[in-house]
Each structure stands twice: as structure tokens, then as C-alpha cells.
Amino acid sequence: MAAPLRRVVVVGASLAGTRAAEALRAEGFDGDLVVIGAEPHRPYDRPPLSKAFLGGAVTEDEIRLTDPAAASAGIEWRPGTQVTGVDLAARALKLASGQPVAFDGLVIASGAAAWVPSGLDTGLAGVHVLRTLDDARALRADLSAAPGRVVVIGAGFIGCELASTVRAAGLAVTVVEPGERPLQRVVGPLVGDRVQRMLADHGVHWKLGVTATRLRGERRVTGVELSDGTTVPADVVVVAVGVRPATQWLAGSGVDVRDGVRCDDTLRALDAAGRPVPGVVAAGDVARWPHPVFGGDVRVEHWTNAAMGAAVAARTLLDPEAAAPHDTLPSFWSDQCGVRIQGVGLPARGTEVEIAEGSLEDLKFLARYYHAGRQVAAVAMNMTKQLVREGRRIVDGRIAVELAGLPNRTTTK
Amino acid sequence: MIRVDVDLDLCASHGQCEFAAPEVFTLDDNADLAFVAEPGDDQAAAVRAAVRVCPTRAIRVVE
């Protein structure tokens, strides 16, 4: 049994980092607790950035993640601090300032950063990403100062939510997406096609099956060149093609960082040989782990995964021998055009989809996703009550398979 | 014993609490939330999970 931890440092001060720190205190950890955040702000909630915050319906104060009361719970917050490396043998972080920060327990919650493909990384004014509060402030200011034609590159959740918010503000918006439809990877073709039509009905223009190859403009962007040879005029461009796990600071540390921090099912970080790194756990967008319900490693960029995984990681760090697996089902929500889209499970693993209740046309339905006859996910529009029960079906289906003595570690993808 | 308090002005009917603690939280057909204010101690862990997973942080527990 390892000695009790005396000093835990959390790298990352967004949802996973904040929740991990709070969970450590809730679980009785009374040593030094430091939370280091790269951004200069107090912790805030990201989901509203592309929706209510961008649209002006909520303020910065309303998206804070911590109560002022909780801020005094013996947690040392260090915002605006860049971690550049870690020496696991010496148990110390390196900061951009050169100052070392000692720890005996480490929570990796550094999240992910917006990714901009080379060619779109131009430095032109009017070109944005949307990941941080500063990104959202800049985009909001630009949309007010230069209300004109908006081009969104990428039709994932952020791209679709942005398109919906921008249309609600009365601006012209075109979405460029190399796939055949929006949200293809997260909800599949049937629901993705319905999202495309819903947004089109609200006036969103689509450029599907083409790639944005180059941005035009001298100092400020004027247009987006596409792989089909056409150019879409633009006053504001948002690059929303996805994120990459923020693991540069872990390079060379011994932690396995191929597609995020590789973890065991209790969120202990692993080295390249698959052995747990003592006293190091990970949670949130940055963590990849073998999901007990689905088998195979998953890395989940959803809010609920950060909220729940942080608590698992905190318990694992304090008592690895009593650690429980992180078995929360992936789940997400997205609000677009006044419609709530929700999902549970891994729709991307589904090979068959059925509409179990309601209808696509009415934008009120429950869709079930199956792989090899077993339900792996459900997605709903405006059917929260029905969707809530689907998580239980997915877990029960899995248990039934295990009780029947079938292989319980199949990797489907 | 635990006491559950929900700020219904904050609640946005995501339904995450019902999945975490179905014995305590229920959305009705209009997606309005009903909840058991004083659930048994056997529900404490499920309620704490519901607190964590509420996207609008509308749920509080008094122990």
C-alpha cells in the first residue's frame, strides 16, 4: 500500500479538472491541492459558448463552473499558467515560467485544443475557432462588428450549433463539410440527413462533399476556396473541424499519449508498455480508456464524460486498490433550431438504425442503433423522456450477453 | 438522511438525473421534472451521481 498522498496537482481547470479537485476534497483528501489552468479565466462551462453565450442570452457570470464559496475549499487555483513538461521520476511539472511544481499525485485533465488544418492557418482577420471563452468573445465581437456572410468549416456539433445560432441572429451562413452530411460520425446518415434538412429549413446553406482548401483575403478574410474550384464569399469564417488532445506537455514523459492519454478502466494513466504510472490519473476529453460496456478503447469528448470521469479518477488516485471502472455511458446533447438532440451510447458503432418512436419528419423521434443485433446507442430529437430509458436498455443488453457466456471483450471497431 | 433540492428555474430538462437516479427523478411527458425530496439512504450514491451529471447544476443535496 502506497503512502497517502500529500500534494495533488491537477493540470487543466475546465470541467474535468474542476470536478476532479472537488471530488478529491469530497472524498476526504486534505493535503495540498493545486489546479493549474492554461486559460486566464476562472473555470467556466463550455457548452453555452456555441449556443446561449454566443447568442447573447447568457453572460460570463452565468457560465462559471465553481461557486465563490467552493473556491475557498482549500484549492489553490493557478489560471493563466502553461505547463510545458513533466518529470515523473522527480515528481515535478515544468512551467513556461521555468518554475517547477512538485506533486506526488497528478490528475491529467488538460482537455483538447481546437485543430486548424494547415492551409487554413493564415492569421487573417475574421477567421476564428471556437473552443475557449476568449474564442467566443472574439467571435461574438466580430459578428457584431462585421455582420455579413459567415462560413463555418466543419459540420460536427460545434459547426451545426454555430450555424443555428448565427442564423437565429439573422446572418447568412454557409457550412462546408467534406462528408455527405452533418454529424455523420456522431449520429450516422439517417439522423444526419434530418439535421441537414432542419438547418436548411432555417436558411443554412450547405456545401457538402467538398473541402475548404484555402482562405482568400489580404488582411481580412474575403472568401473560402473549395476543392470543387468554387469560392464562397465570407466576412467571418469559423474553423470547426475538431480538436486534438492537449498532450504536448506529456511528450517524452513515459505516459502513452497516442490519441490522448491511454488509461486502464479505472483511469490510471499507462506507460507505453501498458503498465500503470503510479500516482497519475486522467479524465475528460484527454483520456482514452477501455469502456467496460463496449469493449475497446474510447475517447469521449462529451460534457457528461468529463463530469463523471473526474470523480472516478479522483477516487482511483486516492485509493487505487479500491478503484472502480469508469463505466458511465457516453451521452451528449445539442440544441439547434429550438430542437434538443440527445444521444446515449456509441452511435458510430451502429450498423443498423431503426426509428423506435415518433417520426423524423416531426423532429420528434427516438432512434435505436444496433451492431450485430445488440443495441449500442440511441439518439432522440425532442424525446428526452424516452431517451433516458435507453441507457438502461443498452447496459441490460450487455449484461444479458455476458450472462449468456458470450465473449465480453469484443472490439467492434 | 439526505434531502434533495432542485432549482427548477435552472433545470433545462436534460434528463441526466433520471438516468442516474430513476427512483428519485422523473421527467413527465411534458419534460417537467418531479423528484423525491427525501429519498432513502440507499439512493445517496445515485443522487450524488445525478448532481454531478446535471448540465445546469440545478440539483443540491443537503445531508
Image: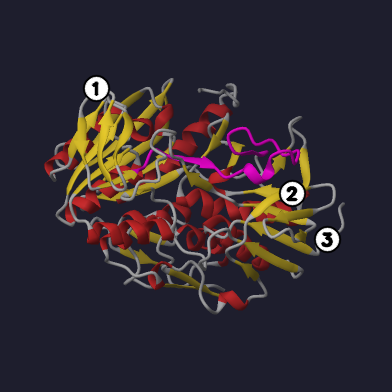
Instruction: Give the CA distance from mark 1 to mark 2.
Output: 45 Å
In the structure shown, which secondary structural element does the residue marked by tag 2 occupy?
A: strand
Question: Quick check: A388 above or below B9?
Answer: above
Q: Is residue A194 left or right of residue A385?
A: left
The numbered mark at residue A228 is 1
Residue A33, percent from left and from top: 70, 66
Circle 1 chain: A
**Is any part of residue A356 visible from this angle?**
yes
The numbered mark at residue A4 is 3
Question: Quick check: A59 above or below A261?
Answer: below
In the structure shown, which secondary structural element does the residue marked by tag 1 occupy?
A: loop
The boundaries of the magenta stretch are: A239-264
Residue drawn where x is 17% and y is 51% of the image: A148
User: Badge 1 local density, few (<14 within 10 Å), some, or many (20+)?
Assistant: few
Mark 1 or mark 2: whose residue is earlier in sequence: 2
Q: Are marks 1 and 2 on the same chain?
A: yes
Front-lying residue, A162 or A312: A162
